[in-house]
Amino acid sequence: MSDSKKPPMSPRAKKYWASLIGASILGVIGGFLTYPVGYELGRKAGAGEMPAGSWFEAPIDSTVAVAIAVIWGVLLPIMCILYHRNVDEQEENAFLWAGLIGWYAMIIIAPVWWVLAWAGIWPEAHIMGIFLVGMIVNSAVFLWKKFH
Amino acid sequence: MKNRLKVLRAERDWSQAELAGRLDVSRQAVNAIETGKYDPSLPLAFKIGRLFGQPIEEIFDDEFDGE
């Protein structure tokens, strides 16, 4: 006989979703603080204009920068701990593979970029560019392992 | 690893989401196990066995031929 009633969300699942929603809210707040708030405050304070084609080198207000650092360096890790304590094992497996491949992407790209820049073949290595590549690779592997 | 999870689920007319709720995992986890893309941990395999009232080896087939 069929029992089609779906069980209510478990405490684990509730904490899992809380961690995801919390991290997302932090991301939105961080992004909003980065731009336009931080940039606009920095620009108005005379920190200069955003260089053409170089978003990462835009001026930013120092107080806002500290707030962003606290969000990324303190609050986000708390959300990550909550996430990893409550994520189910298949997603954790996807996350571990994504972390591994993302790490390899960074440790391969960083020295290659650095040595080619040292030789003057490529532009100077950009830390946020390498971070971005790592994040993209990490996200792609995670989504593949989680949903494919 | 091959398994009978989809058959056992169908016999009870459960959706993947319903089974996921009973096992306290995501629907994607159930789908990945059913399609053989993810092998569950031993604790989860035992949980699956208890839920369906069958031993693990009746649900999962490691294709061990005894040699």
Image (spheres, helix red, strand yellow):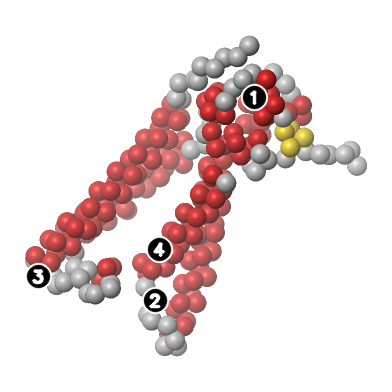
Residue at 57% x, 25% y is B15
Residue at (59, 22) in percent of width and height: B14
**Up-down: is B8 above or below B29?**
above
The residues tagged by marks 1 and 4 sit, at their Cα atoms, a distance apart of: 42 Å
Which of the image's four quarters has the C terminus of chain B? top right
Do the dots labelled 1 and 2 sit on one chain?
A: no
Q: Nearer the viewer, mark 1 or mark 3?
A: 1
Indicate the quadrant where residue B3 lies. Answer: top right
Q: Badge 4, how many Cα within 10 Å: few under 14, some, many 20+?
A: few
Q: CA distance from mark 1 to mark 2?
A: 53 Å
Residue picked out by circle 4: A132
Please tell me whether residue A98 is drawn above or below residue A23 in the rendered image: below
Real-space Cα separation, disc 3 to disc 2, in angstroms: 27 Å
Query: Mark 3 — on which chain does it sit?
Result: A
Which marked residue is nearer to the observer: mark 4 or mark 2? 4
Q: Which residue is mark 2?
A: A125
Tag shown at residue B9: 1
How crowded pointer 2 is (Cα within 10 Å; few <14, some 14-19, many 20+) is rated as some
Q: Can you tell which quarter of the image residue B28 is in?
A: top right
Q: Helix, strand or loop at disc 1?
A: helix
Image mark 4: chain: A
Q: In x, y percent, where is residue A142?
A: 51, 50
Q: Are marks 3 and 4 on the same chain?
A: yes
Q: Which residue is mark 3?
A: A46
How far, Cα to Cα, is label 4 from label 2? 12 Å
A132 up-or-down from A24: above or below:
below
Q: Residues within 10 Å of mark 3 (few under 14, many from 20)?
A: few
Amino acid found under the numbered disc labelled 1: Arg
Q: Identify which amino acid the numbered label 3 is placed on.
A: Gly
- Numbered disc in front, either 1 or 2: 1
